[in-house]
């Protein structure tokens, strides 16, 4: 008899980055859970001109209770920072935030 494998409850943050400019932008995207060591990032990303691209970040939902806030940030060009703030509104679910550049 096989032991059942239990999956961890997860909290997902989807970050949609829209580049309204006429040239591609390159940079890094981060999600940081406030007052927590939980942080995730992706460097070397391309944000296509006049396009939207989505990134998904996954955290253990035990560490991110309902009501916990987070920040999503894009760093691009010559150290330009764009941030948006969100909150975990439902257990074991996902949240979506949008960032517009440039």
Image (cartoon, helix red, strand yellow):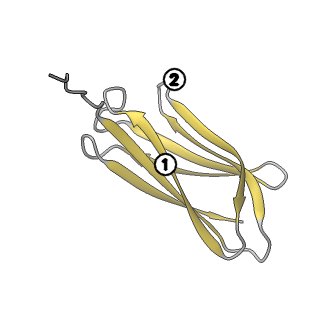
Q: Residue 77: horizontal and vertical position, in percent?
A: 81, 56
Residue nearest the viewer, comparing 48 with 36:
48
The image's mark for residue 37 is 2
Residue nearest the viewer, comparing 85 with 17:
17
Q: Which residue shows up at 19% across the image and 22% down it? A: 3
Left or right? Give the position of 79 relative to 75: right
Callout 2 secondary element: loop
Q: Residue 4: horizontal and vertical position, in percent?
A: 19, 26
Q: Residue 29: horizontal and vertical position, in percent?
A: 64, 47
The image's mark for residue 85 is 1
Q: Earlier in the sequence, mark 1 or mark 2?
A: 2
**Mark 1 or 2, closer to the camera:** 2
Viewport quadrant of the N terminus: top left
Quarter-wise, where is residue 30 in the image? top right
Left or right? Give the position of 25 relative to 63: right
Q: Residues within 10 Å of mark 1 (few under 14, many from 20)?
A: some
Left or right? Give the position of 68 relative to 84: left
Q: Which residue shows up at 67% across the image and 64% down it? A: 101
Spatial CA distance of label 1 from label 2 is 17 Å
Q: Which residue shows up at 54% across the image and 32% down it? A: 39
In the image as oriented, which residue stretches furthest toward the front? 1
Task: Look at the picture and state if 39 lies above or below 22.
Answer: above
The image's mark for residue 12 is none
In the image as oriented, which residue stretches furthest toward the right? 78
Q: Residue 35: horizontal and vertical position, in percent?
A: 47, 26
Callout 1 secondary element: strand
Residue nearest the viewer, comparing 21 with 24:
24
Q: Which residue shows up at 61% across the image and 39% down it? A: 41
């Amino acid at each position: 008899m096989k032991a059942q494998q239990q999956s961890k409850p997860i909290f997902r943050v989807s970050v949609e980055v829209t580049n309204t400019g006429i040239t591609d932008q390159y940079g890094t995207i981060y999600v940081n859970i406030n007052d927590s060591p939980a942080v995730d990032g992706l460097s070397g990303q391309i944000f296509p001109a006049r396009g939207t691209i989505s990134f998904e970040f996954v955290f253990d939902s035990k560490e991110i209770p309902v009501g916990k806030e987070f920040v999503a940030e894009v760093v691009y060009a010559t150290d330009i920072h764009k941030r948006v703030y969100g909150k975990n509104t439902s257990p074991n679910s996902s949240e979506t935030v949008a960032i517009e550049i440039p």
